[in-house]
Image (spheres, grey):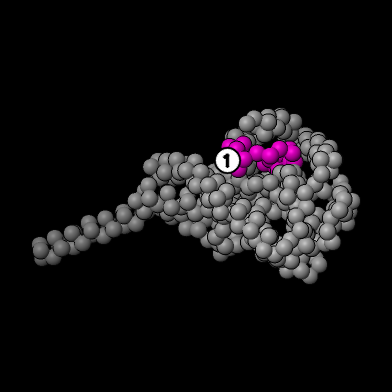
Amino acid sequence: MKGLNTVLATSLVLTGMVVADVQAATEWNVSLWGKRRAFTENVEKLAELVEQKTNGEFKLKLSYGGLSKSRENLDGISFGAFEMAQFCSFYHTDKNPTITVTELPFSKDVSLARVGEIYMEVFKHPEVTKDLARWNATLLMPTPLPQYNIASKSDEMSSLEHFDGLRVRGPGGIMGVLGKLGAVKTSVPFSEVRQSMDSGVIDAASFAPHAHLATNSYKVANWVTTNLNLGSANCPVVVNSEALEMLKPAHKEALLGSVDEALAYYVENYEQNTTAKFDAAIAQEKVTQVTFTPDQTLKLNDLAASVRQDWVDKYKDRFDSQALFDFTEKQFAQK
């Protein structure tokens, strides 16, 4: 009997150890969409680094569309449906008005690495942290993107008047400028862009190179711009604030301490592979490249100034939009 008790006791101790080991392991669900591409390499690298640094005790389980629709990722974060997600601010500007400041057309040609630095600084601004706190969300990491350019199936562009009536899928800042030229902002799901262009639902799409490649928009396009320089989208990676606070200190350190390395990898990968691949693709498809003249660029920049002021006026009663704009403009002005 004594031997049996010893066996039982030993068994319980071992079982307890197994339970403890299971409980010690942490797995976060991460909601993405589409498929793995240059746009998600920051999250892919982050997951790799976190698992390495914690010897597999903390893992990020990446899901491409299995957890939520892309436009509902912020909602899912708010009630803890998953712990981490990527989303684009222009998907739902009313949910995250403060970070749309980075999508304004600042008419600056800045490096991809600098875009990441600017976004990180803006993410720390009190107005921004307060805004995202409404969703129980903490901004973790940006997904810096190059300046957007337009691919269109319409007749070749010869003047800015060609934008009048053009149905374009694009982010707020760019569409704010093109809208003043008569372009019509038209929303279609990311996965349906090529089909929508092919069928005539939209005439054009405004993307960074990776998205033109992912959607194959260039394969049905007659022309693509080369120097629009009216900004890009802000598509950050966020975490559920409560889940972040509940992490073990070592796991939290591994997560936060891997952000810079993940971003550096993302930027290098994007610049060395994606941009060059897109240039080769449009050359192979014989897509006409449209480069705006200095006079056209000047007019676009004049319109951009009014769009920036429109943004400040629109949100001045909701938060200190002028202070946030001034802070962001200063970041873009710095080299």
Stretch in magenta: 98-119
Which one is nearer the viewer's eye here, 323 or 264? 264
Which one is nearer the viewer's eye here, 67 or 190? 190
Residue 262 visible in rendering: yes
Question: Could you say which quadrant of the image residue 36 lies in?
Answer: bottom right
Q: Is residue 147 left or right of residue 199?
A: left
Q: Position of residue 227 (x, y in %)?
A: 74, 46
Q: Is residue 211 left or right of residue 229?
A: left
Magenta region, main secondary structure:
helix
Q: Residue at x 71, y 37 (%)?
A: 108
Q: Is residue 81 left or right of residue 23?
A: right
Q: Which residue is mark 1?
A: 113
Q: Residue at x 67, y 34 (%)?
A: 332
Image quarter where the N terminus lies is: bottom left
- Residue type at numbered disc 1: Ala
Q: Is residue 327 above or below residue 112?
A: above
Q: Position of residue 17 (x, y in %)?
A: 26, 55
- Bin the neighbour count of mark 1 within 10 Å (Cα to Cα): few under 14, some 14-19, many 20 and up: some
Circle 1 SS class: helix
Q: Position of residue 83 (x, y in %)?
A: 52, 52
Q: Residue at x 47, y 43 (%)?
A: 261
